[in-house]
Amino acid sequence: MPTVKTSRRMGTDRDETGEAIKEAAAIATADEPLRPTVAEKMVTIRLTDFEYNELKAAYAKQGVKLATGIKMAALWLLQSGATVTRAGVIDRRG
């Protein structure tokens, strides 16, 4: 039966692999801006009772809390490029 040579890994190989993983992780996260995990400033939004109940019911149908739904909607407006004026929201994408 022929003899098969196998190479043994050196301890430095393992160290280089760990460094490569760290560098790859740093590159992968470099494009995304860092977001704080703790709120630095709380913002109050004033709603009438009618607006509050309408929004809460609409988000509750989807299983989303009111604050989460409002935050998601505001971020979507920002990212979609919509223009917000006193007259309302203008969607100029199409």
Image: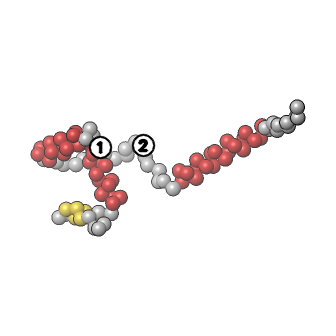
Which residue is disc 2 drawn over? 37
Amino acid found under the numbered disc labelled 1: Thr
Q: Up-down: is 70 above or below 5?
A: below
Q: In this view, does 88 lie above or below 73?
A: below
The residue most toward the top is 1
Side of 44 relative to 9 (left or right): left
Q: Where is residue 13 in the image (x, y as percent from the top left)?
A: 75, 41
Inspect the image, locate mark 2, and give the three-letter code of the amino acid beneath it.
Thr
Question: Which residue reaches farthest front?
Answer: 1
Residue picked out by circle 1:
68
Q: 79 or 44, which is in the foreground?
A: 79
Residue 65 seen in the current view: no
Give me the residue at 67% from left, 42% from top: 18
Secondary-structure class at tag 2? loop
Residue 50 percent coordinates (x, y): 11, 45
Q: Which residue is drawn at 25% across and 41% down?
A: 62
